[in-house]
Image (cartoon, rainbow, N blue to C red):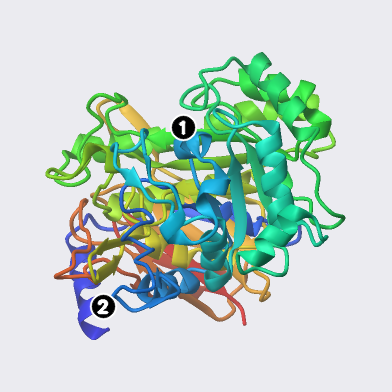
Amino acid sequence: MKKTMIALSLAFAATSHAQAATTVKIDTAKPGPVIDKDVYGQFAEHLGSGIYGGMWVGPQSKIPNTRGWRNDVIGALKKLHVPLVRWPGGCFADEYHWREGIGPRNKRPVKVNTNWGGVEENNAVGTHEFFDLVEQIGADAYVNGNLGTGSPQEMSEWLEYMTSDSKSSLADLRRKNGRDKPFKVAYFAVGNEAWGCGGNMKPEYYSSLYRQTVSFLKTPPGQRPKLVASGGNDNDGSWTEELSKSAKHMTDGISFHYYTIPTGKWEVKGAATGFPADEWFSTLQATMRMEDHISKNAAILDKNDPEKKLGFYVDEWGTWYDVEKGTNAGFLYQQNTLRDAVVAALNFNIFHAHADRVRMTNIAQMVNVLQAMVLTDKEKMLLTPTYHAYEMYVPFQGATTLPLSLEGNRNFSSGGKSIPQVSASAARGKDGKVYVALVNTNPNEAEEVSIAGVGEGKASARVLTAAAMDAHNTFAKPDAVKPAPIDVQSSGGKLTVKMPAKSVVVVAVGG
């Protein structure tokens, strides 16, 4: 710990002199909406080694496992308090037929994963294995139904198989396959990205299919999941407009997808490491567009659903870079750096600010794919900077938002464009403490931030930072980037923290 603190001090000293430029004023007397725990949801798709190898190694593997799920990854995810896992896709979901993933594994059909790498899919991980995973880590289940190549009957029968406590043939089949009690399905989506890989549909056509399908999705009392309509992406509000009118009384929420790409071009997205300084800025600027996307869609929802019954579910989001050299382009494996942790924290703060509508999100993805929490290589495992950002924000799950204002916040500029230097969010945790999350987007300048309105009670804080913009953990040095304590000063009714450049800080007050 001493070495870590020395390293942080040197990193801080190397930056420009901190200025007391930003004051965060918090009003603890006016609590706002609760941050749904599912805002911190995860995503596990049948894609590359995101499941096979990364999490599932099979019961016969020499890698320590519990019923096929590797113990090291399960342990890491439990510490992260993962509230929700989305499965089996993604694009994979609209080619997935659930009956192929039940029964003896050696008798399940081998298919081709046409979306991701053209590799064989042996269906070793199916319904029972997935629920074993979420139960081991203590998470809820978000199941994505097959609209693209499936049918209302197939989805209806899958729900009956999972949730029925009757003596029906499907419920008895579940029992025969080893599960007596019904599975608990928290969310069920009808299709995925219907505008693209899920069928290249128009909003009106999808809406008709959605309403037809949902008419047949029936469960026993108390077992009904929240139903999710597949919505739009980027800045197009047409899907939210259509679904919030035509399917308003048949859904619990509308999904939305947005990925952060440094160059803004899908053909050449930018590198995960070794990127130029201007791509640090362009990445953060791009990710902060999430605020515009949510605001635009929330305005549509407020018009069509003023009672706020519908949730806005950002069930795919995160950074997307060019794949690592030497890896299968269809596996979407990328390194994860300090930049990704800053991206994650900026999005958390945006989600908190819209807690009245944003009630669930799922980062893409959990292990070895895109902005992953965990990277593995055979028996080896490491935690990424994004994992540590999620861990630092655990107290915000189920916390009550507190309004705040930023005074004296400077801009971080590059190439004639600017973003705010400091991002902040505050909430009262379920433990009664006030938590304040801060992000310094500037990779070169430290910032002294004052926090007013929370008194001078006992305060502690942790920081996530590093000397290099692309600092990351490797299997040789798995702890190169991880949180460390940082000093909080108390004086004159305010708390003050000196934030290093390019850092994430979470302050806890009280208790």
Q: Between tags 1 and 2, which lies in front?
A: 1
The residue beneath circle 2 is 5
Query: Where's residue 85, x and y in %?
Result: 54, 56
Residue type of the residue flagged with mark 1: Arg
Looking at the image, how many numbered discs can be counted on the residues?
2
Q: State if disc 2 and disc 1 touch (CB < 8 Å).
A: no
Observer-nearest residue: 15 or 157? 157
Residue at coordinates 72% horizontally, 41% vertically from top-left? 156
Query: Where's residue 388, x and y in %?
Result: 38, 65
Q: Is residue 249 left or right of residue 182?
A: right
Query: Where's residue 295, x and y in %?
Result: 61, 31
Residue at coordinates 61% horizontally, 57% vertically from top-left? 141
The residue beneath circle 1 is 289
Q: Is residue 89 left or right of residue 400?
A: left
In the rendered image, the residue lying farthest to the front is 107
Residue 166, located in which quarter of the rendered image?
A: bottom right
Q: In whole angstroms, how far apart are the C-alphas of marks 1 and 2?
A: 34 Å
Residue 341, located in which quarter of the rendered image?
A: bottom left
Observer-nearest residue: 198 or 237? 198
In the rendered image, the residue lying farthest to the bottom is 2
Residue type of the residue flagged with mark 2: Met
The answer to whether any part of residue 492 appears in the image is no
- Vertical placement of residue 479 versus 2, above or below: above
Query: Which numbered marker is on residue 87?
Result: none
Label 1 secondary element = helix
Of labels 1 and 2, earlier in sequence is 2
